[in-house]
Image (cartoon, helix red, strand yellow):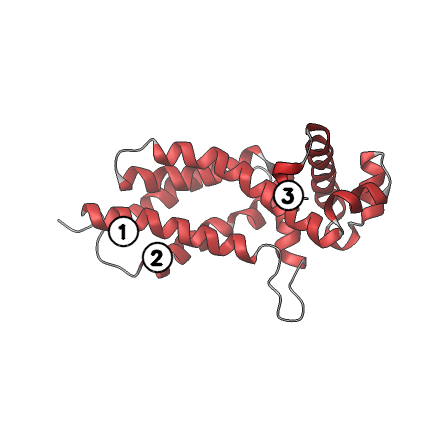
């Protein structure tokens, strides 16, 4: 059902199911996340889930989109409020890590999906498209810096992959060490990639 044709009640029910799916993923792991377990958490029947999402694969995709929205809703205003690409890159890194600190359960659910939900029969996995979007969006920020003369000449795809790789390594550390100092890491990553991207005087 396309979003524009859903009623307020249907949207609220979908949001409730997605929230319960995140809870079950975070608490039980992907392999033990079933529609029956999600339905029990939501106090509904599995048929209600099937009505709104069709099946587990579609629900998992909706979870990925919801977690991505949580992240971008936090990050985008921070980045767009900056007046230089250098500060935009700083905001990008800091807001990524801030999201991880604020939304531990959605982060854990997403880690479960990325780790265990792979595509079959040449189909993309549920997070593959979002991963490509993250790289492409970061390339736009790096392009801003090169066009403004703030950043040196480098291959934007390679630099974007390096930055995302450093950020995407954080959830695993955070899950094993909940008290890991995200603020300190953010400062170090900002320093590292500011030095790596800036044009030499």
Q: Nearer the viewer, residue 17 or 83?
A: 17
Q: Identify whether 78 is placed above or below 135.
A: above
- Residue at position x 70%, y 30% from top? 12
Q: Within 10 angstroms of label 3, few (less than 14), some, or many (20 or more) residues? A: few
Q: Within 10 angstroms of label 1, few (less than 14), some, or many (20 or more) residues? A: many
* Rendered location of residue 94, percent (x, y): 42, 37
On the rendered structure, is 30 left or right of 77?
right
Q: Nearer the viewer, residue 23 or 80?
A: 80
Please tell me which of labels 1 and 3 falls first in the chain: 3
Please tell me which of labels 1 and 2 falls first in the chain: 2
Nearer mark to the viewer, of 2 and 3: 3
Is residue 183 shown to the viewer in this render?
no
On the rendered structure, is 198 left or right of 108?
left
Please tell me which of labels 2 and 3 falls first in the chain: 3
On the rendered structure, is 78 left or right of 6?
left
Residue underneath mark 2: 159
Q: Nearer the viewer, residue 54 or 20?
A: 54
Residue underneath mark 1: 197
Q: Quadrant of residue 154?
A: bottom left
Q: Pointers 1 and 2 in contact (CB under 8 A)? A: yes
* Rendered location of residue 63, percent (x, y): 65, 44
Q: Real-space Cα distance between discs 1 and 2? A: 8 Å
Q: Real-space Cα distance between discs 2 and 3? A: 37 Å
Residue underneath mark 3: 2
Is residue 107 shown to the viewer in this render?
yes
| Disc 3 element | loop
């Amino acid at each position: 059902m396309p979003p524009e044709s859903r009623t307020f009640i249907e949207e609220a029910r979908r949001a409730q199911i997605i929230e319960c799916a995140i809870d079950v993923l975070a608490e039980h792991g992907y392999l033990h996340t079933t529609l029956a377990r999600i339905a029990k958490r939501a106090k509904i029947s599995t048929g209600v889930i099937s009505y709104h999402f069709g099946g587990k694969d579609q629900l998992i995709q909706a979870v990925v989109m919801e977690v991505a929205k949580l992240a971008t809703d936090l990050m985008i205003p921070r980045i767009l409020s900056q007046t230089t690409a250098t500060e935009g890159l700083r905001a990008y890194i800091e807001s990524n890590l801030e999201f991880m600190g604020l939304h531990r359960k959605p982060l854990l659910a997403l880690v479960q999906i990325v780790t265990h939900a792979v595509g079959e029969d040449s189909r993309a996995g549920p997070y593959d498209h979002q991963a490509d979007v993250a790289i492409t969006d970061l390339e736009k920020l790096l392009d801003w810096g090169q066009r403004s003369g703030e950043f040196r000449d480098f291959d934007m795809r390679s630099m974007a992959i390096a930055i995302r790789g450093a950020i995407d390594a954080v959830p695993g550390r955070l899950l094993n060490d909940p008290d890991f100092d995200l603020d300190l890491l953010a400062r170090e990553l900002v320093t590292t990639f500011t030095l790596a991207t800036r044009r030499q005087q």
